[in-house]
Amino acid sequence: MTGLEEPILGFWQRLVRTEDPGAFLRALLLLFVAIPVLMAASRAIRGWVGRKYTAQQGMVAGKVVLYPGLVLILISVLQQLGFSLAPLLGAAGIVGIAVGFASQTSVSNVISGFFLIGERPFEVNDLIQVGDTIGSVMSIDTLSVKLRTPDNRFVRIPNETIVKSQVTTITRFPIRRLDLNVGIAYREDVGRVRDVLLEVAGANPRALMEPAPNVFVDGYGESSVDLRLAVWTVRDNFLALKSSLLQEIKERFDADGIEIPFPHRTLYVGSESDPFSIRTDRGKPLGSGGEEASGGEDVSGTPGTSGDQDGRGPEPFDSRDTGPR
C-alpha cells in the first residue's frame, strides 16, 4: 500500500460505519425513485403556479421544491450508506469560506436576482431592452437573466448588470403607440396631407380608434416638412401595423400625387458673383495673368517659362465662364 492510498482508505473507513448490504439497496432506491418523483412534483407545482399566477412565480416555486428536495435526498443517501456527516460538514464549511472569497461577483448576482424577483420589473416572456440588446425573457435565474433575441440568438445578462442598467420593458402594457415619421415636400398642403394620413390610419383594422390616431408637425427638415403619425395598437400587432401603414401611406401618396422628397443640393453661381480664386498643385494663388503670383512656374508645369510657347501668358480664369474661350 502506497503512502497516498493509506490516508484515503482511513478517511473512507471513518466515514462509512455500516456493513449492512441493504443500505446500498435503499440508497439506490432513493436515487432512482425519489429523484424522478421529486422532479415530476417540481414540474407539476411550477405549471400549477404558472397558470394561476405568473410564469416567473411558477419557475421560482418549482425551484423552491426541487433544490431543498435534492439536498434532503442526498443527506438520506449518505445516512443509508453510513456516512458521518460531521467531517463532511466541517469540510463544507472550509470550502464554503474559500468559495465565498473567490465568488464575490456571483454572490452579488444572487442578491441582485432576489431584487429582480421581488421588484418584478419584467416577467418571463416579456420583451425587454437592456442597453442595445432587445430580447424576450426566457428565465430569471439566480445568477443571470436569459434572453432570446428576435433573430433567435441566446443572450445571458448577469443580474448585477441588469440592476445597475436602464431596462425598458417593451411589452409591459397591453397597448403601444406607433410613431411614423413622414416627410412631405414644402409645396404640399399640410392640412390635406394630415387628412390623408388620418384616413389611412382609420382604415387599418389593426389601429385602435381609442386613443385616436393623431398627426402633428414635427419640424422643418432640409428638404421636407416632417410630420409624425401616432397610432395606438395592441402590442401583438405592433410590427404588423407598422409594415402595413408604411405600404398604405406610400400607395396613397402616389395615388394623390403627394411628393415624398429626398435630400438634394442645388449649386448656383449668380451673374453678379465675383470670380473665385484657384490654386495650383503647389498651393500658390494665380495672378491676374494666370501665372503664380511669385513669378515661378506657370500652370502648365513647364519650368522656366512665363506663358505659352507663342509668348502669351495663359488666359485668366473666370468662374462665370461656361466653356473654353
Image (tube, rainbow, N blue to C red):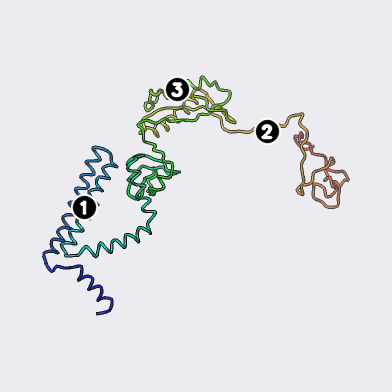
Which residue corresponds to mark 1?
A: 69
Circles 1 and 3, Cβ within 8 Å, touching? The answer is no
Mark sitting earlier along the chain (2/1): 1
Q: Amino acid at mark 3?
A: Leu
Res. 236 image quadrant: top left
Q: Can residue 214 be spotted in the picture? A: yes
Q: Amino acid at mark 2?
A: Leu
Q: CA distance from mark 1 to mark 3?
A: 60 Å
Q: Position of residue 321 (x, y in %)?
A: 77, 35
Residue mark closest to the camera, 2 vs 3: 3
Which quadrant of the figure contains the N terminus? Answer: bottom left
Label 3 belongs to which residue?
A: 198
Measured from the top left, where is residue 293 in percent x and y? 84, 45
Query: Horizontally, is 209 left or right of 318 in the view?
Result: left
Horizontal arrangement in the rendering, residue 145 relative to residue 302 (left or right):
left
Q: Between 139 and 323, which is closer to the camera in this rendering?
A: 139
Q: Position of residue 225 (x, y in %)?
A: 55, 27
Residue at 21% x, 70% y is 12
93, above or below 269, in the image: below
Residue bearing mark 2: 267
- Gap between marks 2 and 1, in whole Å? 79 Å
Label disc, if present, on residue 172 of the rendered structure: none
Please name the residue shown 87% across and 43% down the image.
312
| Contact (Cβ within 8 Å) of mark 2 with mark 3 | no
253 left or right, relative to 40: right
User: Mark 2 or mark 3: which comes first in sequence?
Assistant: 3
Q: Nearer the viewer, mark 1 or mark 3?
A: 1
**Which residue appears at 43% of the width and 30% of the height?**
178
Given the image, on which type of amino acid does mark 1 rest? Gly
User: Regarding mark 3 in the picture, which secondary structure is present there?
Assistant: helix
**Residue 155 visible at all:** no
- Which residue occupies the extreme right position in the image? 311
